[in-house]
Image (tube, rainbow, N blue to C red):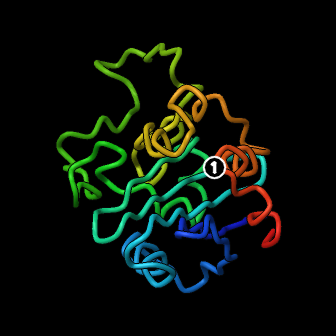
Amino acid sequence: MYFAALLARTEDGWEASDTELDDVETLSDLTDLAREVSEEDTVLVLIEQEDAWFGVVRVDGEEDPRIYVSDAAAAARSSYGEILLTDELLGREPGDDDADLDSLDLDGTEDGEPEDSEDEEDEETVSGEAVSHSPVGDRDILADLGVSEKELLALDEGDALSTIAEALGAAEVLETVR
């Protein structure tokens, strides 16, 4: 189950609204949705898939959106997560979706030897790309709002959005839209 909400910081404090992401297909669509709430104030888009991953998109006026995703591999399996996982966020070159067939190792080994890697359990293949089960994005996305990098990384997916809202002083307004 998914939950998505918009938190806008206004002169009077935080205002929350739940949002449907059914018509959102790209990060640009999501950014436009946030700017519809407020063109000048800070707007946070909070998205979670129950106990699997959460994401925060921060839109400050006309600046480019800042993104944080708690578990890239889990988010990559989600249609909403795929919106957040841009090539730039994953460290890929834009348009690198089509691999050069000459560079592919089609038998899964290098020089015929099986690859022993302890990291294999921490990665999944999504669209032919290895995606790690680690956080990606701007870890300082909420630092100026009271949630440090260390605190953000320590959040449990099950109650992360509530913890973030509490640190922002927006727990009550977020609960009204849950």
Residue 129: percent from left, percent from top? 39, 45
Q: Residue at x 66, y 46 (%)?
A: 164
Q: Amino acid at mark 1?
A: Leu
Can you identify the residue that label 1 sits on? 168
Numbered label tally: 1
141 or 21: which is nearer to us? 141
39 or 80: which is nearer to us? 39
Tell me which corner region of the image, top left, top right, bottom left or bottom right, holds residue 14: bottom right
Residue 53: percent from left, percent from top? 65, 47
Tell me which corner region of the image, top left, top right, bottom left or bottom right, holds residue 42: bottom left
Q: Residue at x 81, y 68 (%)?
A: 178
135 or 67: which is nearer to us? 67
Q: Is residue 150 left or right of residue 107?
A: right
Q: Residue at x 57, y 38 (%)?
A: 147
| Vertical position of residue 75 compared to residue 103: above or below | below
Element assignment for label 1: helix
Tell me which corner region of the image, top left, top right, bottom left or bottom right, holds residue 114: top left
Q: In which quadrant of the rendered image does the N terminus lie?
A: bottom right
